[in-house]
Image: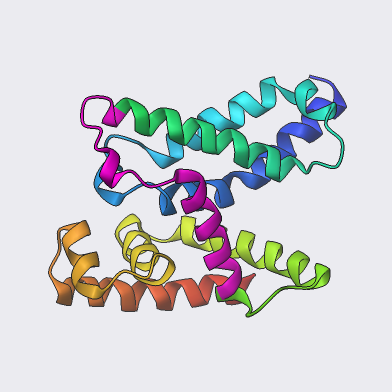
Amino acid sequence: MGPDQEQWARDLEQLRPVLVLLARQNVNPRLWKDVDPSGVVQETLLEAARSQNQFEGRENSSPEGWVRRILLNNLYDALRKVHRDKRDVDREVSLAGAILESSGRLERQLFGGDPSPSERAMAKEETLALANALAELEPSQRDVVELYHLQGRSLSETSTLVGKSESAVAALLHRGLKRLRELLQQR
């Protein structure tokens, strides 16, 4: 592997936490056993690593945007496999729209309104820090924090999705947010 390929691999690996967060936000938690968001991200990063020469020919395109498009396609494929026999057109939601919505939700949570270029750069760093900190939480804490705060689900709905009582979810939220604050302050 040459120096350019090694740098490309490092650059892709830095995107992993944000990609996992996006994938988790856009796959229904009930499907996490059928569509593993981390697995889809791993597949995406391998595909991007193998396809570096395809990216290098694109003008005015960021690697992050290009890799997100690969992730989108891989999520579509994974969800199609799960729903192949269970497709209900009335219940189908645009995954592309959902990914854009979740990205916008993260940006709105970091700052309000339309961001300036410097605010976008800061938000990108903050989003990466948040994604890294979320990855360090215990899985049950991460799940409830993401469902309740990032997806905006109610306590009742969150408890149903994770299969725990509302009081257990509230305790997980409390401990998860406390740990998340600690992790973010350390950065």
Taking the spot 52% from the left edge, 67% from the top edge, the residue there is 105
Front-most of residues 178 and 70: 70
Q: In this view, which residue lies farthest toward the left?
A: 165
Magenta residues: mostly which secondary structure? helix
Residue 19 position in % (x across, y down): 55, 46
The span shown in magenta is 82-108
Residue 14 position in % (x across, y down): 67, 46
Front-most of residues 151 and 19: 151
Question: Within the image, what quadrant is residue 118 found in?
Answer: bottom right
Residue 175 position in % (x across, y down): 34, 75
Side of 139 where 103 appears, left or right: right
Front-most of residues 38 and 151: 151
Residue 84 position in % (x across, y down): 28, 25
Q: In this view, which residue lies farthest toward the front?
A: 90
Query: Would you say residue 60 sits in the magenta stretch?
Result: no
Side of 153 where 181 appears, left or right: right
Side of 185 where 77 appears, left or right: left
Front-most of residues 116 and 140: 116
Asked if 121 appears above or below 63 in the picture, the reply is below
Asked if 81 appears above or below 10 in the picture, the reply is above
Taking the spot 22% from the left edge, 25% from the top edge, the residue there is 85
Question: Within the image, what quadrant is residue 45 found in?
Answer: top right
- Which image quarter holds the C terminus? bottom right
